[in-house]
Image (tube, helix red, strand yellow):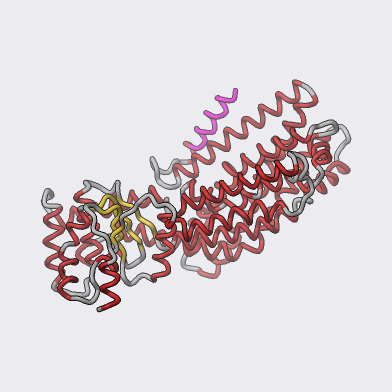
Amino acid sequence: HLDADVTFYSARRVARVGAFLSHSWSAPRWRKALALYYYFNIELAVGAGLVTWLSLMVYMVAVNGPTGMGGNQYLLPLFVGGPMVSFLCFFFCGHALRTPITDVWLDKLCIHQTRTVLKVEGVTALPEIVASSDRMVILWDDTYFQRLWCNAELATFCSVNQGADKLDVVPLWLPPWILSTLVCDIISVCLSSRLLVLIPMSGEYFAKQLPTGVPWLSNFLGTFVGTGIAVTVGCLPIVLPAWHSFRIKLYNHEQMLMQCKEHKFEHAKCAVESDRAVVYELVAGLFKHAAEPIQEFNRFVNEDVSANIAARVGHPSGIPYKLCLLAFLPLTLSSAANIWGCDEMPCSVAAEVELGGGASPARQMLTSCLCWTVGALGVYPSTFPVMLTMMTTIKTNFGSRPCVRFFLDLLAVLASFVYMGFHEGFAAGLIITASAQARTGAAPGALWCSVATAYLLLLVQWNVYLFKTQRGVGGKKKPEEWLSLTKRSARMIL
């Protein structure tokens, strides 16, 4: 009993519990550990990464000056590697410094595991402990709703708190998916950054092929094609890993929501069959306001808990906007290397190449910053909803033909990265051309700024369509409703 005694008596007595951890014992421990790191530390980890990123920028500007880093090769590992190391350190260790929830109840630590009398007292007190908890954190795996005592914990907490608002569901598939996606993004960033030389090369090619009187067109096409090819080729090595991670995500996400929507408390399993009558009596008492308490609990899980999960992690064919921003964090961090590095050219040279003779480095850097902002907030996040929508459609139509589905899924992943690359190329080309034309005169500048503004409004509407409707908020919009949104945007511009 010695080890169990040390663990049990090291727990602290509290009047209320900050978070009650509800989980299935059959789930792998490493997955539950990752889920807890994610739940407690992810915001701190992102914040630490961004603070490190900003601190490095301030330091490098103070040492080298705003335009003194043009052409430097070490900026990418500095501005991506440093913040990501900080991110990982705080992801795994941040709870030792700060945590929003100080008192956590975990059955393995708070119920004695070897002394029978103490164990029975702990199990008997479960309903009271759950009722005294401010939040419940569900570490979901595909066995969670099959466990009788997990159902009892969920029923007690949600009955006492009159709903699922204080329920936090952390799917065990989510943290591994996020980390693997970040790794893939780092690989693609490293490769794509080496290929950005294709932008000036493409511009030179189009300048030779097009009439001499339209330099803006060669610059636009050079940025559009060069960026598109660089990003697409840089993503080629991660097509297969991305397909695998998204396939797993899609399957587990569907399973999770299906279990909620089809939940039947009567089908739950328990290790000790005599517990079933006790738990049935508990749940019936908690939902006694309904004519059929057990059916009312089933309805609560089918509807309320399902809606809570969908609001936090989206629907299978979608993904929340914040998660997309997180998944593309390395790509966003790489923007500092590109902006301060002036596209790996001396800043004065980069300004004239991109914006024309006489352009200042400051103007070029501000234009590049705007391109990256549009990409990071509007273009990159839309990639994953597009990918998941295509994969869901393929599964619906070719689910019974695995070989065909595999091939089409790979094409969908590749097409999504092509979309991301050429979409970013189009946005950057439009913004750079507008900035260059604004220097040549009022009329061309006003025209191109209007075109760029129209594009940005449409981009906002596109993201609203993807992130608000695809995850089921307000229902999925029909094509004619999307057309209506587009027309309203056009009227706003006019």
Q: Is residue 347 above or below residue 437?
A: below
Q: From which residue to which does the magenta span run? A: 482-494
In the rendered image, is residue 299 in sight?
A: no
Residue 45 belongs to magenta span? no
For the image, the number of numbered tags is: 0
Q: Which residue lies furthest to the bottom in this view?
A: 1
Rendered location of residue 14, percent (x, y)? 24, 55
Q: Between residues 398 and 362, which one lies in front from this camera angle? A: 362
Q: Which residue is drawn at 32% across and 58% down?
A: 138
Q: Which residue lies furthest to the top in this view?
A: 442
What is the quadrant of the N terminus in the image? bottom left
Rendered location of residue 341, percent (x, y)? 74, 46
Rendered location of residue 414, percent (x, y)? 62, 58
Describe residue 151's horizontal placement relative to residue 291 as left or right.
right
Q: Residue at x 53, y 66 (%)?
A: 244
In the rendered image, is residue 246 in sight?
A: yes
Describe residue 25's horizontal placement relative to residue 274 as left or right.
right
Q: Is residue 10 above or below residue 387?
A: below
Q: Between residues 256 and 190, which one lies in front from this camera angle? A: 190
